[in-house]
Amino acid sequence: MEDSKNTYDQYLDSYLDSFERYGQSSFISFRPIPSMTEIERIVEEFMELLFPGRSGRRVLSQDCIREVIATLLNRIGENLEKQLFAAWYHENPFSLPDSDTDPYKDLAHTTVLKLFEALPSLRTMMKEDAQSAFEGDPAATSIQETIISYPSIRALTLHRIAHFLYRENAPLVPRMISETVHKQTGIDIHPGATIGRCLFIDHGTGVVIGETTVIGNQVKIYQGVTLGALSFPKDACGALIRGAKRHPTLKDRVTVYANATLLGDITIGENTIVGSNSWIRHDVPANTLVQNEEPKSIMRELSPRGVPRKTCDAHSSSQE
């Protein structure tokens, strides 16, 4: 074992040299950072808090709901406060010495209080999302089904939490929440995206919604849709200009069908329908249908052994 240890030690110096090459990427921090494991636990607790019974835990009676909610609130509050403190302490925006942590503890505590104060209005929007999923999907048998099993409800519910924390300028934690949900659902919503009421994301796999996206009320989005940036503006030194509006705005009652790609700071007007596989880089006026031309399909008659015999145009009754 000693010989093996010495053999591996020969790589130590060359490996440590790599820590001097790339600035901030060399060390995450010598201060504590938020834990992704803890964030994932908080995510599950939030889902149970917002929709009690969703996790399968039994609520014994209507009388004990107050006790259940109180327990969840306190547990989430304590754990989230610890993660927010670690995030601000890691970022150290006030440039405080390690011995002065009170301002970040106070900031974390105040942020959790603000979030809990906003929970009633946030939960109303989450319930509207669940109602929209039920009304928009003929396969749904109940609102409860959408809450329990639809990935879009999980994604939107936790996005509204992450977005609130993002608006409070909390570092790291909002993005960690959104990436946890992305991993769980396949729906990638940046916590900075502004989403109105009653959004319905059908299926949801592969949906990407960028940071500066603005989505109005009663919008429908289907699987594979990208609301992305066309390009990334840079300053005179070639560095990315951060914070500029670079993603689409969807007005009220817009519908975007599967695999459509909308890029850049464009506006899609009210009541517009964007067809599947569309590629859009320009504004679209209200009350418009945007779709690609229907592709020409070729059908070939096969012999019993699977060998093509004849070809016919799917749009014509004649055979070639």
Image (cartoon, helix red, strand yellow):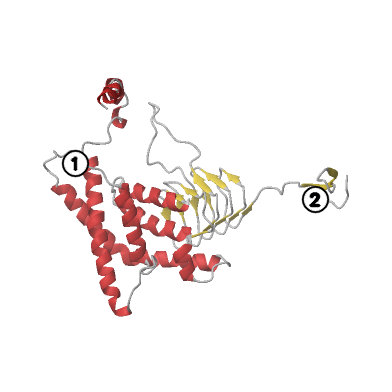
Q: Which mark is residue 314?
A: 2
> 109 and 268: which one is in front?
109
The percent position of residue 219, horizontal first and vertical second, equals 51, 59
The C terminus, quarter of image: top right
Crowding around mark 2 (Cα neighbors within 10 Å: few <14, some 14 to 19, many 20+) is few
Q: Amino acid at mark 1?
A: Phe
- Left/right placement of residue 238 relative to residue 287 reads left
- What residue did someone put label 1 on? 94
The percent position of residue 138, horizontal first and vertical second, equals 58, 67
> Which residue corresponds to the image point at 31% horizontal and 56% vertical from the top-left?
42
Q: Earlier in the sequence, mark 1 or mark 2?
A: 1
Report the mark closest to the observer, 1 or 2: 2
Q: Can the viewer see residue 80 in this picture?
A: yes
User: Where is residue 77, by image quadrant?
Assistant: bottom left
Q: What is the secondary structure assignment of the residue under circle 1? A: loop
> Which residue corresponds to the image point at 35% horizontal and 47% vertical from the top-left?
175
> 124 and 147: which one is in front?
147
- Left/right placement of residue 53 relative to residue 288 reads left
> Which residue corresponds to the image point at 61% horizontal and 55% vertical from the top-left?
288
